[in-house]
Image (cartoon, helix red, strand yellow):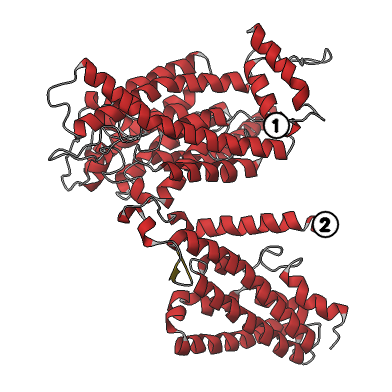
Amino acid sequence: MKWLYNITEKLRPHFEEGGKLHAFWSLYDGFDTFLFTPNSTAKRVGAQVHDTTDSKRTMILVVLALVPALLFGMFNVGYQHLLATGQLAAGLTAALWWKAFGFGLLAVLPYIIVSYVVGLGIEFTVAQWKHEEIQEGFLVTGFLIPLIVPVNTPLWMVAVATAFAVIFAKEVFGGTGYNIFNVALITRAFLFFAYPTHMTGDKPFVRIGSTWGWDGGTAVDGFSGATPLTELATTTDAHLMPVDFLTAANGLIPGSIGETCLWAILLGACLLLCTGVASWKTMLSVFVGGALTAWLFNHAGMDNAAANMPWYMHLVLGGFAFGAVFMATDPVTSARTECGKWIYGFLIGMVAIIIRVLNPGYPEGMMLAILLMNALAPLIDWCVVRVNVKRRMNRGIAK
Amino acid sequence: MALSEKTKQAFLGPLNANNPVVVQILGICSALAVTVQLKPALVMGIAVTIIVALSNVVISALRTTIPSRIRIIVQLVVVAALVTLVSAFLKAFAYDVSVALSVYIGLIITNCILMGRLEAYAMTNGPWDSFLDGLGNGFGYMWVLVVVAFVRELLGSGTLMGQRIIPRSWYVANGGFYENCGMMMMPAMALILVACVIWAHRGLNKEEKK
């Protein structure tokens, strides 16, 4: 790495105050600190907390945790394509396996590029404009966005939604660490409300046509691109069970790019929990809240397919697991107090299932549930702190 | 005719530095409700301008005779009479617009800009100044509505004043790539657009900052 360090150090004068390329100082500084730890250290006075992780390293861990879901998502995009066009009639051979992955790679890569180019472009511009360092928050957001959109979303819509989210959900609040709402979810919410026909129904989730002109096809007879949750929301059969547990957990079903495979998500969850990046309390309580609510609906005797579906199915279908692991645990927008995390997570799971069951207009409730609880998180924290203060005050009063 | 500095300020102030919507944050409710399309927004702006200007004149002329204990009721009666007139006029001559505006013409009575101007200006100034103040506030309200409605109608419906601007062949349904932004049709987006106008306004009027 010595040669790389030498190059960056050699370039430094050009970007510093008075250099020719000073307009790009924030860009240079961003990459420099991304590659090497800054050599500025804390002063030798007072008490200091030393830790080798900073927010850049933390974010990189989240990105690493997302990689299994991304790789699986790429494969699944291709797999669904082959399935829809009838190419898997003779089973999945090695050649078809690679074709599926290649197709998915070509289909998903543009989303990653668009999301990063637009988001980082805005971040760099704002940082330069306000004479601040580049904030690294978009590293994760830019990676999340491609994973939570349907594969047929037009790229320009993703670009518009990303720009909207980064500007209005993040920069106007003061940038990374100050946002009230999860930026990636705002991107999805914008798409959802602005272009509903591209986000729900049976068209968006499976790409039947070609990717960059490669391997176009037509759907075989009887093919439906609806996600299991869409089927649930639109069916008239009150006891419909769209897929069984293992199929849903294995994730070879239509859905947003990264949300389908439970195992890939759990792999990411393991990394997040082992490194202590995400809170196990939030994660667990989302699942507990969702399971309990769904279990209650199971026993409510309602004439509603989503209510009658076994509770454990709710946890593997749609974006529930993905949201619980990667979105609800976002340290910026979730509750900060330890007790608050339990309440926050539990309510996310609960609200998500309630939306799924009681509102057929929204087959998936995870996005709205997390956004709602993002807004309430400060209130939860406030209450938890107040209760604690009161308890300790009472303790001090002599009996 | 030479206008005194105060008279000029009565008209010009509300257009920019003392704008009722973007500086005083009044009349936001109707600004969200009627700006889905440009035409109703324009009509709403004109209606508010006429009503606030005329009621300002009437109240200003009566200001010495109104007992201060019942002045709010008197103001309301004057405003309500004018609103009823405008509403009836719209129903007679621009029925489709009056349907599009539905209750919002009637709700001009409750528009904070009106009561605000009557209380803050017409009660203490002469009819001519009050008239100009009303006009200024009406136009100040109108330009914000027009800006917001322009963006909302163009991006939300692809039209302007009902005329198609974005060609039909661009749309996904017709084999194109474009799609209207449904967010623009929602009041939430109007709020964000008003915020953007405020943002731009503050950016351009740095010296106004305290």
Determine the secondary structure under disc 1.
Answer: helix
Q: Amino acid at mark 1?
A: Phe
Report x, y in % for residue B89: 51, 89
Q: Is residue B113 visible?
A: yes
Q: Foreground: A396 or A149?
A: A149
Q: Which residue is mark 2?
A: B207
Q: Amino acid at mark 2?
A: Glu
Check chain identity for marks 2 and 1: say if they share one.
no
Q: Is residue A343 visible?
A: no
Q: Which residue is mark 1?
A: A24
Q: Foreground: B153 or A28?
A: A28
User: The residue marked by circle 2 belongs to what chain?
Assistant: B
Asked if residue A198 is positioned above or below residue A68 in the image, the reply reads below
Q: Foreground: A28 or A316?
A: A28
Report x, y in % for residue B188: 51, 56
Identify the residue at image location x=58%, y=34%.
Answer: A120
